[in-house]
Amino acid sequence: MQELIIELATLKDLDSILKITQNALISMKKLGFHQWNENYPNFEIFTQDIDKNHLYICRKKEQILGFVCINELFMEEYKDVHFNPKFNNKALYLHRLAVNQNFKRQGVGFKLLNFCEEFAIRNNKLSLRADTLSKNLPMNSLFKKLNYQFCGEFNIKNYNDKFFAYEKILKNFNFD
C-alpha cells in the first residue's frame, strides 16, 4: 500500500481542498448538521491558511485525502471554555479538518490528528485544542477515541447548536 504523506498545502492544492470541502458539506447536511456552509470555509480562508503555512494535506501519490489547519489562534468564542490554563501559552489549535469522502473510515483523520500531535511536540507545544459542532458525531467520536478531553461548550453567532471544545495534553509535566 502506498504510504500516506502529510505536508504543507500549496496554492496548487486549492481545487482539491475546495472539492473535499464541498463534499464534506453535502455529507454534513445528510447527517443532519450544518457545521460548514456555502460561505465557510471558503477560498479566501484556505488561501490565508496556505499563505501562513497553517494548512497541511494528507496525500497518497497525487490525490489529497484530507487536510487540517494548525495554528496558535485563540478564538474569542473560547473565553468560557475550561482549557487547562497551564498550557495557554503552549497550545496549538486545530481547525477545518476534513477527509475526502472516498477515504472515510480508512484512518486519514486519525493520521492527520497524530501528525498534529507530532507537529506540536516538535514545536515545543504541550497541548492541542480543537472544537466541533455538538451534532458532528463522527468528529466528536474521533476526538474521544484519541483521548481528547471535553473542556466545555460555547456558541458561535448564527449557529443554533452549541460547539464542543476539546484538549489533549501531550506530555506529563510536574508544575511544582
Image (tube, helix red, strand yellow):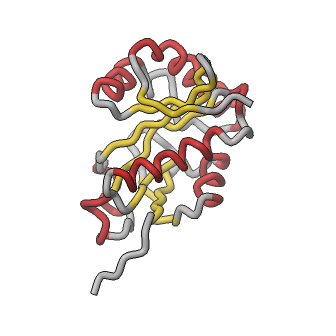
Q: Is residue 74 left or right of residue 137?
A: left
Quarter assignment of residue 104: top right
Q: Is residue 72 above or below residue 172?
A: above
Count of residue discs = 0
Question: Residue 10's x, y, as percent?
Answer: 40, 19
Quadrant of the image for the N terminus?
top right
Residue appearing at x 28%, y 62% in the figure: 88
Question: Residue 130's x, y, as percent?
Answer: 45, 51
Q: Is residue 31 left or right of residue 76?
A: right
Quarter assignment of residue 59: top right
Quadrant of the image for the C terminus?
bottom left
Q: Nearer the viewer, residue 61 or 77?
A: 61
Q: Nearer the viewer, residue 64 or 153?
A: 64
Q: Is residue 83 above or below residue 15?
A: below
Residue appearing at x 55%, y 42% in the figure: 112
Q: Residue lying furthest left in this view?
A: 89
Question: Residue 73's x, y, as percent?
Answer: 29, 45
Quarter assignment of residue 54: top left
Q: Residue lying furthest bottom in this view?
A: 176
Residue appearing at x 47%, y 41% in the figure: 159
Q: Is residue 55 left or right of residue 138?
A: left
Question: Residue 141's x, y, as percent?
Answer: 65, 54
Residue appearing at x 28%, y 30% in the figure: 52
